[in-house]
Amino acid sequence: MGNPLDSYAISHHYGRDCPHALDALKAAWQVEVFDPRWGREDVLWECLTTVWAQ
């Protein structure tokens, strides 16, 4: 878990690998999703898939 990346961190981490995508990355929403019960591999992805399908 961590904080959202600021513009500098995005440029630092991704600028060399995909410079054409920097503007899109900087403008994108940063969302962190996690299942508080470690080890369950059948709950989180199913929930995310359901939400994305709406």
Image (spheres, rainbow, N blue to C red):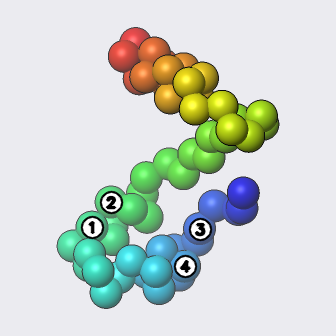
Q: Which residue is mark 1?
A: 21
At horizontal 56% and vertical 24% (from top left) the residue drawn is 42
In the rendering, at what x and y percent does residue 8 appear?
Answer: 53, 81
- How far apart, in angstroms, are the residues tagged by discs 3 and 2? 13 Å
Image quadrant assignment for residue 23: bottom left
- The mark nearer the N terminus, 3 or 1, is 3
CB atoms of marks 1 and 2 within 8 Å: yes
Most extreme residue toward the left is: 20
- How far apart, in angstroms, are the residues tagged by discs 2 and 4? 14 Å
Q: Return the mark for residue 24.
A: 2
Image vertical order of residue 19 relative to residue 24, above or below: below
Q: Residues within 10 Å of mark 4 (few under 14, many from 20)?
A: few
CB atoms of marks 3 and 4 within 8 Å: yes
Image quadrant assignment for residue 22: bottom left
- The mark nearer the N terminus, 2 or 4, is 4
Q: Amino acid at mark 1?
A: Ala
Q: Amino acid at mark 4?
A: Ala
Q: Residues within 10 Å of mark 1 (few under 14, many from 20)?
A: few
Q: Secondary structure at mark 3?
A: loop
